[in-house]
Every structure is written in C-alpha cells, then in structure tokens.
Amino acid sequence: MKQKMSTQRLAFLGMMTALVFAGNYARIVMPVPVGGVPSFTLANILCVLSGLLLGPVGGLASGLGSALYDLTNPLWAAECWITFLTKGAMGLMAGVAVSAGRRGPEAGRATYGRYLLSAVAGCLTYYVLYYLKDFFYNGMLLGGLQPQAAAVTLLAFVPTSLFNGGVAVIAAPPLALAIREALKRSGLRLKTA
C-alpha cells in the first residue's frame, strides 16, 4: 500500500531536520580523561521529538539533521554516515514505538505514558548503537585498542550519555504533547504513521 506524504507533513519533516541540525550547535563539551569528545546537546531532545511527532519518518529528520551537522565540523565529518544511521535509528525507534500503540480504543490518543516509553525506546536504541560504534570503530579499528581497553574507554562516556538520554526522555514527551495540542487548536493534524 503506497502512502503519499502531505505537503504539511513534508514541511514539518524539513522543519524538524533543520531544528535537529541547529540543536547540535547548542553544545556543551564535557572534559574526559580518555579519547573522544562527549558533549551535551539539544539535538537528542529534537531527535526523539521528531519520532514522537512524525512517527517512523521522524528517523529521517533526526538522522539527516545530525549528519548534516557532522559535515560542518571536520572533527566529525568522516563519521557523518554513522551519525545518520545511529541518530536516525533514535528517531525511527521513538516513532515506531509511538505508532505501535495506535490501535484499538486508544487509537489516535497521544498520552504522556506512550510518549515517555517511546522516548526511552529511542534513546536506548541510540545509546546501544553509539556504544557499539565507539567500541568497534573508534576503539578497536581506529584506536587499535585491545577489547578490554576499548571497553574501559567507554566508561568515560557513561555519565554524559546518561545525562543526555535522561534530558531527552524528560523533555521530549511534554514538548510533543504541547506541540500536538497547539496544532490541534490551530486546526492542523499531524499523522504519526
């Protein structure tokens, strides 16, 4: 079954892509004793928000916005394709999770609980992929580290990851509910699936 994307939904997808891109510039770098540059950014909130508002298509906004940002920074440009996949998976999983609960008597109802669980699913997906990438790609392949040493370097990123993920899980669901309510009052409807 082929489904067309409405002009409104396409415009919202473009806007969310731009917001994810811009959200990466609001960055606070966290100093760590071993390699890497962990940081707090608003982009994680916006990646999850893309999935909550657009459904699985939100993964495109989160992946594309983040990958485009990586292309503007020589430090991350070589890994933009990985960022597209990992951040895209974050929005995709949040979108899949929020869309999965749209059956039966609850169909069409946006609830905080559904959004919260979907945000957790999106963040968990991203951080599993992020740590796998850091372990294999950055640690063992590029860094030439033994598996044990590569695993130890990941520990330095845990506090920042927990903070980033926690803020995204806390902030994205109420933002999604507020935006949905504002759209509803304006007579606009944004389908998630």
Image (cartoon, grey):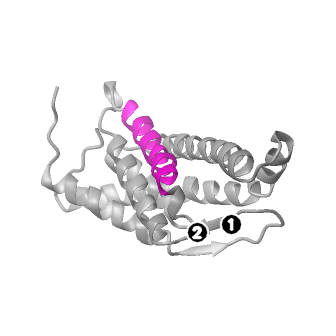
Left or right of residue 156: residue 172:
left
Residue 145 visible: yes
Q: Which mark is residue 75?
A: 2
**Residue 20 location, quadrant:** bottom left
**Residue 162 location, quadrant:** bottom right
Residue under pointer 1: 37
| Residue nearest the observer in this picture, 188 or 6 | 6
What's the magenta region?
Answer: 80-101
| Residue nearest the observer in this picture, 138 or 161 | 138
Left or right of residue 188: residue 18:
right
Circles 1 and 2, Cβ within 8 Å, touching? The answer is yes
Residue in the image at 46% along x and 39% along y: 93
| Residue nearest the observer in this picture, 118 or 16 | 16
Name the quadrant of the C terminus: top left
Residue in the image at 55% along x and 64% along y: 76
- Residue 33 position, x and y percent, is 84, 66
Q: Which mark is residue 60?
A: none
Instruction: Estimate how packed mark 1 is, as few (under 14), some (14 to 19) or many (20 or more) residues with alpha carbons within 10 Å.
Output: few
Name the quadrant of the N terminus: top left
Instruction: Estimate how packed mark 2 is, as few (under 14), some (14 to 19) or many (20 or more) residues with alpha carbons within 10 Å.
Output: few
- Residue 14 position, x and y percent, is 27, 61
| Residue nearest the observer in this picture, 116 or 17 | 17
Q: Amino acid at mark 2?
A: Leu
Q: Amino acid at mark 1?
A: Val
